[in-house]
Amino acid sequence: MALEVNDSNFEEVVIKSDKPVIVDFWAEWCGPCRMIAPIVEELSQEYAGKILVTKCDVDSNPGVASKYGIRNIPTVLFFKDGKIADKQVGAVPKSNFVTKLNAII
Amino acid sequence: MTVCVFASSSSRINNKYGVAASQLGALLARAKLDVVFGGGGIGLMGKLADSVIENGGTITGVIPSFMKSEGWDHSNVTRMIITEDMGERKKQMFSMADAVVALPGGIGTIEELTEAITLKQLGLFKGPIIILNTLDFYKSFIEFLEHMVSENFLRYEHKGMWEIADNPEQVMVHLSNKKSWISNPRGIAKI
């Protein structure tokens, strides 16, 4: 299961993680976000132990969304050592995520 | 309430169309109505979005990824939903819409407006559909709808599916009007 991150725990969970982290920025009313949600869930299982897979509701967490300039949704950010290593905007095939993930682990 | 606005992306049009789009954006923002639109950065879409933002409103764009790649997206909206294609874009916009407003536009705008009317005819969309008839732009389209009625391609009752507004203030009046169209659209969907 992708872990829910929010304004309060983002620093602790994502920035201070010793593993690479992906954050799926989504909103309840966003159709394309619902399309990539199952892909993100699959990645959380397939990469278990290698990366941390998280998701962040932009409506409930304006602090994180604003800090990282998340205007477009869905946006997936790839963090390594607390810094943004890559980014994927829009609903794209799973292979796009896999390629980017493999490059940072 | 979320108002879905369909509009042109052409910037080669009479400035009066742009002025009306800006006025509408300001009125929607001041009325605290959320706006959803096609996400374009130029033309009437751009004017509308600029005005909503300047007046402190909330506006969400919905744009296919290929248009974003072309750089056609507005860069300053509250939120931009990136869809895979045009069909998904319209589906997303309708899923958010409590009301539809069509500004003057080309083929894309007409397609969106007529889909709204089609959905309403079938009982799949129940909100108001308001045509902003700036400079009488929609005159021949409205006449064509009348022609459909006179030739029995549409029922007389179907004329109640849309409202015509001559200016942005009238759009706001139609938006605040609670009267709904017939209770069982599907009963007369078959002509």
Image (cartoon, rainbow, N blue to C red):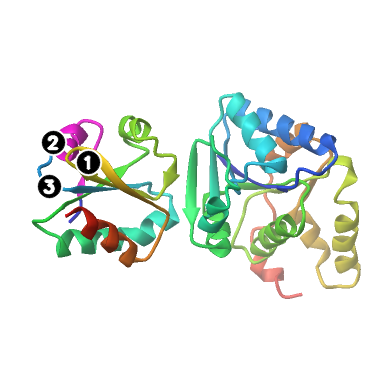
Compare marks 1 and 2 and give the one earlier in the sequence.
Answer: 1
Chain to which mark 3 belongs? A
Question: CB of mark 2 within 8 Å of CB of mark 3?
Answer: no
Q: Which residue, given by chain and number where applicable, does mark 2 sit on?
A: A16
Which x, y percent locates residue B37?
A: 60, 46
* 10 Å crowding of disc 2: few (<14), some (14-19), many (20+): some
In 3D space, how far apart are the residues under numbered discs 1 and 2 (Cα atoms)? 13 Å
Numbered tag placed on residue B178 in the rendering: none
Whether labels 2 and 3 share one chain: yes
Q: Is residue A85 visible?
A: yes
Numbered tag placed on residue A19 in the rendering: 3
Q: Secondary structure at mark 3?
A: loop
On screen, B169 above or below B114? above
Q: Is residue B98 left or right of residue A40?
A: right
Residue furthest to the bottom: B190
Whether labels 3 and 1 share one chain: yes
On screen, B154 above or below B17? below
On screen, A93 above or below B33? below
Q: Which residue, given by chain and number where applicable, does mark 1 sit on?
A: A5
Q: Residue at x 43, y 51 (%)?
A: A30
Q: Residue at x 81, y 68 (%)?
A: B154
What amino acid type is highlighted by mark number 1? Val
Which x, y percent locates residue A43?
A: 21, 61
Q: Secondary structure at mark 1?
A: loop
